[in-house]
Structures are given as structure tokens and as C-alpha cells.
Amino acid sequence: MSSPLALADAQVIGTELAIRWEGGRESYLPLELLRRNCPCALCQGESSATATYSPKPKNYSPASFVVRSLQPVGGYALQIVWTDGHATGIYPYSYLLSLAEERAPEG
Ligand SMILES: [Zn+2]
């Protein structure tokens, strides 16, 4: 793929985020998976190349897996605001695509 990822449409359908990419490809991501893989510093911690990453238990609630709003950011990412108030997760399109492909590898 030589062209950069571009988002044609993104909407929540049931418990999944449905993404349509320019070119017609589609990705479906469970909201719970998205939240558990939130890329923000609060969720991922301050890890460095030399530090051992130790995941901390998080206090998720049902509201943690419900989307309040979606906001495209700078043409390269999607900011997801969750109903529990968490709004710092900015998901680059390439990250969304890799999450979707990890879940359902093609070929
Ligand atoms: Zn987060």
C-alpha cells in the first residue's frame, strides 16, 4: 500500500466500531478491545525502552466500553471519548488497522 490510510467513515454499531477506509476496505473493532488497547499515556503507563513494562490492573466499568463520541484528529487519527469520561485516547489509523488485523488476520 503506497497511499496513506484515510478514513471514509467511522461509526459505532452495537458493541463494535465499524470503520470504512478510503478505497472501500472495512474494519470492525470491539469497543472493549479498543478501550483495553487505549494508546494514551494514562492507560499504557510511562514505559521506556529499558524499563520493564508491568501492566497495572484498571478499574473498568461497563461505561468504560461505551463510546460517547468520535472525533477525527488531524487527518491521521481518531479520538475516542468514552462514557466514563476517558477522552485522552487518540488512535492513529494505522494502529486501528493493526488492531483489526491482529484480530482477524488475512491470508
Ligand atoms: Zn487511555
Image (cartoon, grey):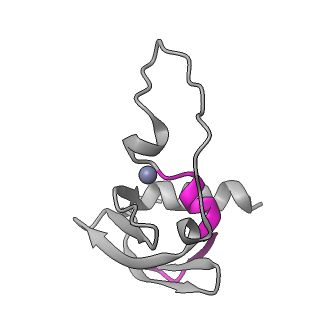
User: Would residue 35 be counted in the magenta stretch?
Assistant: yes
Q: Total marks drawn? A: 0
Q: Quadrant of residue 72?
A: bottom left
Quadrant where the C terminus is found in the figure: bottom right
Which one is nearer the viewer's eye here, 105 or 10?
10
Looking at this view, name the residue that lies furthest to the left: 74
**In this rendering, position of residue 34 left or right of residue 84:** right
In the rendered image, the vertical position of residue 48 relative to residue 102, given as above or below: above
In the rendered image, the vertical position of residue 38 relative to residue 49, given as above or below: below
**Residue shown at 40% from the left, 61% from the top:** 86
The region drawn magenta spans 21-38
Q: Locate residue 83, reporting x and y percent.
A: 45, 73
Q: Quadrant of residue 68?
A: bottom left
Q: Locate residue 82, reporting x and y percent.
A: 44, 69
In the rendered image, the vertical position of residue 87 relative to residue 95, given as above or below: below
**Residue shown at 36% from the left, 58% from the top:** 90
User: Would residue 74 be counted in the magenta stretch?
Assistant: no
Q: Locate residue 69, reporting x and y percent.
A: 38, 79
In the rendered image, the vertical position of residue 78 relative to residue 51, given as above or below: below
**In this rendering, position of residue 73 left or right of residue 17:** left
Looking at this view, name the residue that lies furthest to the top: 50
**Residue shown at 56% from the left, 51% from the top:** 37
Q: Quadrant of residue 17?
A: bottom right
